[in-house]
Image: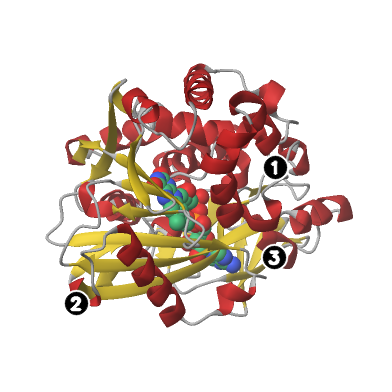
């Protein structure tokens, strides 16, 4: 039986391993972390198992729905009417429907209409190739005008992408607008999905099946290097200073790690991996006595608040307590990224007070801070050409991460789909 190693036990690695096992391969999964799940992993928030980072499901997450069906988990998927808000310069506005847009008085009527037309166009557009080499902020300004861009997008881009804000692919931004914009019950009502028990429900079922069929998932086991072993004609993985041999290897770890992992790659490929940029995230999660608002997603554009938005997760998934995520997207090189947890907790608390004057510190029941340096690949115009091929020059070694489903944004559904596609590539190569 052919031996395959999958590196990374996030949704992509697990979906890939699941398909390979089903096709009769002997599969080992290696995970550096002490748990499965990668960016979608859960943690024990003092009695509540919850994702370290917020996770919602959209209406067109087809690959995820197919996998849930296959795993007998479709009844765990639920939809809920959700609400968006916009906190602009000290005032809370409704957001996310045509009526909300018309009532958004900080913009003049023409700007509101132009914004609406751009949203409508973005949700209907199917072919994106003409946007691949276009710069996103220019593209948005052309559609909605400079004043609307300044109010609705500029601060959001600056807080989320920092010095990359004016060099992003329009195709990538369009795909993000479309995914969320299409997740609706009707023109007037957004709907988002969640799984009973959270992402862990899916992850645990994949793990269960992989292990039941003879696969192994090694936690706390980072792969240090991969090279071609000419004596055995196999790929050799260095794991805990021991060499382990495989016929095929699929790496799903963030691409910036690849040059360290594989030294036998051509210089032009190594340069491409090394040139890729990522944004990290520091994510504060609160248990609160009261809601901040009725919104699931609240965008913020206010000079006094350096946070692009908050996610009131319990306004999506019913939970025994109010749960609010506050993400700070920061390049790892940003000095703020190195600030202690308390710094982010204080900043989030000050933000809550501005959003809801009734909020006070006494409303905080519990708080947790998670950090991850590779939360988001940065996709500049022309990004599709920046990636080396998935099948690397080392025969049998496949290298992917969330960048490879560009222009789609990182998501569980896209990771599942790509993981399964790579499994198929391995199967077809036999
Ligand atoms: C803040 C935030 C919010 C998000 N919100 C949503 C959302 O609402 N909806 C949604 O669908 N998705 C969301 N996502 C994205 C989703 O979590 C990811 O798309 C998905 O988890 C990616 O899975 P993956 O397996 O491709 O990669 P990852 O999750 O990155 O998994 C890669 C794994 O490789 C492991 N690894 C790294 N180096 C090594 C090594 N040397 N050896 C072995 N293992 C290694 C890592 O520990 C990790 O577990 C969000 C992500 C973040 C960060």
Q: In x, y percent, where is residue 117?
A: 51, 19
Q: CA distance from mark 2 to mark 1?
A: 54 Å
- Would you call the spot at circle 1 few (<14 residues within 10 Å), some (14-19), or many (20 or more)? some
Q: In x, y percent, where is residue 273?
A: 75, 54
Question: Of the numbered discs in the image, which one, if any, rests on residue 391?
Answer: 1
129 left or right of 336? Answer: right
Question: Of the numbered discs in the image, which one, if any, rests on residue 232?
Answer: none
Q: In x, y percent, where is residue 19?
A: 43, 40
339 left or right of 132? Answer: left
Residue 34, relative to residue 83: is it above or below?
below
Q: In x, y percent, where is residue 176?
A: 51, 36
Residue 60, relative to residue 350: is it above or below?
above
Q: Which residue is mark 2?
A: 362
Residue 183, relative to residue 52: is it above or below?
above
Colouring scheme applied when the structure was drawn: secondary structure
Would you say residue 62 is visible in this rendering? no
Q: CA distance from mark 3 to mark 2?
A: 48 Å
Q: Which residue is mark 3?
A: 261
Can you tell which quarter of the image residue 149 is in? Answer: top right
201 left or right of 180? Answer: left
Q: Residue furthest right?
A: 267
């Amino acid at each position: 039986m052919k031996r395959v190693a999958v590196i990374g036990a996030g949704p992509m690695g697990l979906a890939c391993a699941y398909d390979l096992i089903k096709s009769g391969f002997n599969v080992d999964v290696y995970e550096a972390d002490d748990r499965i799940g990668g960016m979608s992993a859960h943690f024990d928030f003092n009695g509540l198992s919850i994702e370290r980072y917020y996770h919602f499901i959209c209406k067109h997450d087809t690959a995820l729905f197919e996998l849930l069906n296959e795993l007998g988990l479709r009844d765990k998927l639920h939809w809920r009417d959700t609400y968006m808000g916009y906190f602009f310069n000290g005032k809370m506005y409704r957001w996310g429907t045509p009526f909300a847009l018309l009532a958004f008085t900080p913009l003049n009527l023409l700007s509101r209409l132009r914004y609406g037309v751009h949203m409508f166009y973005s949700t209907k557009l199917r072919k994106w190739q003409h946007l691949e080499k276009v710069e996103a902020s220019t593209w948005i300004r052309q559609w909605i005008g400079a004043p609307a861009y300044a109010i609705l997008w500029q601060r959001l881009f600056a807080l989320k992408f920092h010095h990359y804000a004016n060099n992003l692919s329009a195709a990538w931004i369009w795909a993000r607008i479309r995914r969320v914009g299409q997740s609706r019950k009707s023109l007037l009502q957004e709907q988002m999905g969640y799984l009973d028990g959270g992402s862990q429900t899916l992850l645990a079922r994949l793990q269960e099946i992989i292990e039941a069929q003879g696969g192994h998932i090694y936690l706390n086991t980072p792969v240090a290097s991969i090279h071609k072993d000419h004596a055995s004609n196999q790929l050799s993985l260095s794991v805990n200073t021991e060499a382990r041999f495989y016929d095929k290897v699929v790496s799903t770890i963030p691409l910036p790690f690849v040059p360290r992992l594989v030294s036998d790659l051509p210089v032009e490929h190594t340069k491409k991996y090394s040139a890729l940029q990522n944004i990290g995230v520091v994510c504060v999660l609160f248990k609160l006595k009261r809601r901040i608002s009725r919104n699931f997603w609240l965008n913020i554009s206010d000079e006094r608040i350096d946070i692009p938005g908050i996610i009131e997760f319990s306004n999506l998934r019913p939970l025994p307590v109010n749960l609010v995520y506050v993400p700070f997207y920061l390049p790892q090189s940003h000095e703020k990224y190195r600030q202690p947890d308390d710094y982010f907790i204080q900043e989030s608390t000050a933000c809550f007070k501005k959003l809801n004057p009734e909020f006070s510190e006494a409303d905080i029941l519990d708080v947790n801070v998670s950090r991850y340096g590779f939360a988001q690949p940065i996709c500049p115009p022309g990004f599709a050409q920046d990636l080396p091929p998935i099948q690397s020059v080392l025969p049998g070694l496949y290298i992917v991460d969330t960048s490879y489903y560009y222009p789609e944004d990182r998501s569980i559904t896209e990771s599942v789909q790509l993981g399964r596609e790579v499994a198929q590539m391995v199967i077809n190569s036999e």
